[in-house]
Amino acid sequence: MNTLKISAQNTDITWLKQINHSNTGFKPVSVFLSESTKPILVAVPVVIGGIGLLTKDDNLLYDAVYIAGSTAVNYVITTSLKVMIDRPRPYDTYPQDIINYQIRDDASMPSGHTSGAFATATALSLKYPKWYVIAPSYLWAASVGYSRMHLGMHYPSDVLAGAIIGAGSAWLTWKANEWFHDKYEIRNFRILKKNDLSLVPEYWE
């Protein structure tokens, strides 16, 4: 077991060193991609919700709440795992090998930027399953994950874990919303039935 763990760690740092030391001229782009995460996580539900309010579109408001909920669920899961796993950042463990662009005081596993990006990308893809939404959403999320390694902030396994957790958080929130929606519809149906369903034309058939 220890041999397997050491082998996995060696593979992790080997891949990270290759990514971290490659394309040094691309570093400013990686910084931009990395720093774009939090503003986009906030902007997406705010913009969708704002449009929904202006157009009085309840579906858009519902979408905004769902996307924001996915981000919240992902944040709780990611933060909890960081505390439980408590993996040091790669630049702390390998200071001579990894070039990082900033110092963070939280743990490395999983990548919070990556999980947040994939939560938003998955939420958007589930709500708007069109190629012109899915493709750019996941391209941006994958680019954020790459930027975190390129900037020396995370191991590849941190980024992979973040992608899985982010996508999973959005999917779980989606299923939970479906369950509550179905339960709400059943409850309303029972109330209508109790109050004489025959008076409601849309339920005649």
Image (spheres, rainbow, N blue to C red):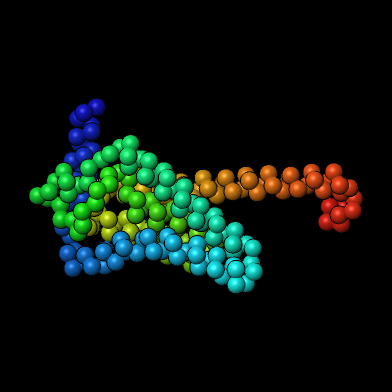
Name the residue at the left extreme: 96
In the drawing, does residue 188 fall left or right of residue 19? right
Image coordinates for residue 23, horizontal then vertical, percent: 19, 64
Q: In the picture shown, does residue 143 fall above or below 161?
A: below
Q: Residue at x 54, y 68 (%)?
A: 50
Image coordinates for residue 147, horizontal then vertical, percent: 27, 59
- Identify the image quadrant of the N terminus: top left
Q: In the picture shown, does residue 138 fall above or below 180?
A: below
Image coordinates for residue 63, horizontal then vertical, percent: 57, 59
* Nearer to us in this view, 111 or 65: 65
* Nearer to us in this view, 15 or 54: 54
In the drawing, does residue 159 fall left or right of residue 8? right
* Nearer to us in this view, 141 or 108: 108
Query: Quadrant of residue 144 in the image?
Result: bottom left
- Counting labels gives 0
Q: In the picture shown, does residue 173 fall above or below 5?
A: below
In the drawing, does residue 60 fall left or right of residue 118? right
Q: Residue at x 24, y 51 (%)?
A: 104
Name the residue at the top extreme: 1
Q: Residue at x 47, y 61 (%)?
A: 134
**Can residue 15 be seen at all in this image of the molecule?**
no
Image coordinates for residue 145, horizontal then vertical, percent: 32, 55
In the drawing, does residue 45 fall left or right of residue 150? right
**Can residue 148 be seen at all in this image of the molecule?**
yes
Name the residue at the front extreme: 105
Q: Residue at x 73, y 45 (%)?
A: 186
